[in-house]
Amino acid sequence: MKNLFLLCRIICCCGFILGGVYGCDSDGGGTTPAPEPQASFTALPFSNDELWECWVNGMSPDGQRLAGACLDVNGEVEAVLWINGELIDLGHMGPPEPPLSRTSFATGSADNDVVIGGEGYANLTPTAYYYNDGTWTQIINPTTGKVAMEATGISSDGTVIIGNTNDVIDNQGDEEQFEGGYSWDRTTGDYVLATSSFFADICDSYANCHIFFWSLTADGKAIVGSDTYSTEGSSIFSSFMDSMCMDKSCEVLAPLAELSAEDKLIPVYYELSGHVPPVRLPLPGNYPKGVAQGISRNGSFIVGAALGNLMPTIAVYWDRNMAVHIIGSLGPDTDYHDTLAYDVTDDGSTIVGRSNGQAFIFTTTDGMMTLEDYLKKIGLGDALTDWELLTARAISPDGHYIAGTGLYRDHYPRGYLVYIP
């Protein structure tokens, strides 16, 4: 009897192990394991089929929500959001102002319903908005009542929003015109202007010194951007509403081409907690100017570009110790200074951006190459038929998703999303 009991235990245990490994169904047969996910290239849908033009400007950290803009049936640009590949038309943000045409665009998305964007009329100063619960709302400094000009970054939970604006500051009892970065916490109402500048001692006023905010971490506590001193006192927003530049990457690239030899531009890292003054990021030798465009969601790595007065523009990144490293460029520099790294994974292993009119990817194993070449290398060559990838605007923290804009069928700007297992 004892031996029979032992035999039964062995049979039951073996059945349990086999069932756990192979699975069981009602017929006692094995269950086929789920297939491994495959690399994919997805063309994002247009807002209409009559006017085919769309641009991707940002992506939520989970890679599921892409923010951008498309031409509507009236030939105006309106904000859109792609969720799991499906286009959601967010429309225009403010009331129409005839006879001026209006341009609306979404620039970023949190992991929830909160989206940031902006709208402008013809060449008038644009206005920053955020979207929540189906409604667009202007971003306003609660102290001065000034409306922000643009929103460039948002935390993962949609609480903290950053951007750039025209405002006023109190300089020892005197009001002065301010132009530069702001951060706003929607929960606490805390609205902070980036009034510190490395060039404050040589500026006639803050009108010539600006710290611009371009990106922030997932928790909304750290920001990167650029500190600018212009001898001409001209606004960096002069090219903001360039009708030929609806991909918002041009917003950063265009002003770089306008810098004179005397103008100053340095990349900065800025912490909101305790309102710590900005940290000046180092640049490679022979490159006196630069911009920090993106920061990993965990804050470990920063990406951007370095410029020299007589040197080609190159993409660069800064590591955990804020040491600078050269990525390079895909070809000879252009008058547009068309090289900029936009985004980086949390581990710093993969960086994406734009160079010489082409989307690029940089990995610590393979170096810098066009994104098209990389996608062909991993077996997506057939999916790229009719495509020329212009910019890689965002990458998810884990590196599985890349989003950007390409030229479709030699004519139409169109958004795309790449999945890499």
Image: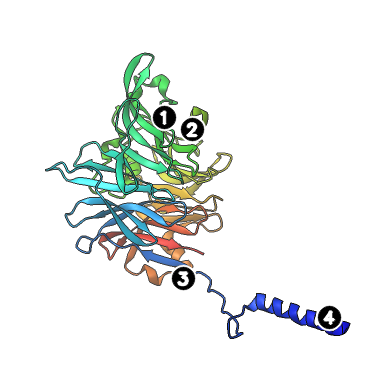
Q: Which of the marked residues, 2 or 1, is nearer the chain's N terminus?
A: 1
**Residue at point 58%, 79% (across, down):** 31
Q: Nearer the viewer, residue 333 or 317?
A: 317
Which label sits on residue 192?
1
Measure the C-alpha gap from mark 1 to mark 4: 73 Å
The residue singled out by tag 2 in the image is 272
Measure the C-alpha gap from mark 1 to mark 3: 47 Å
Q: Nearer the viewer, mark 4 or mark 2?
A: 4
Q: Which of the marked residues, 1 or 3, is nearer the chain's N terminus?
A: 1
Measure the C-alpha gap from mark 2 to mark 1: 9 Å
- Please, what secondary structure does the residue beneath circle 2 have? loop
Whether residue 380 appears in this view of the structure is yes
Q: Nearer the viewer, mark 3 or mark 2?
A: 2
The residue singled out by tag 4 in the image is 6
Above-or-below relation of 271 to 48: above
- The amino acid type found where label 4 is placed reads Leu
Whether residue 276 appears in this view of the structure is no
In the visual, does 247 lie left or right of 98? Answer: right
Measure the C-alpha gap from mark 4 to mark 3: 54 Å
Q: Quadrant of residue 185?
A: top left
Above-or-below relation of 83 to 144: below
- Please, what secondary structure does the residue beneath circle 3 have? loop
Measure the C-alpha gap from mark 4 to mark 2: 67 Å
The residue singled out by tag 3 in the image is 379
> Where is residue 224 drawn, in percent x and y?
46, 38
Q: Badge 1, how many Cα within 10 Å: few under 14, some, many 20+? A: some
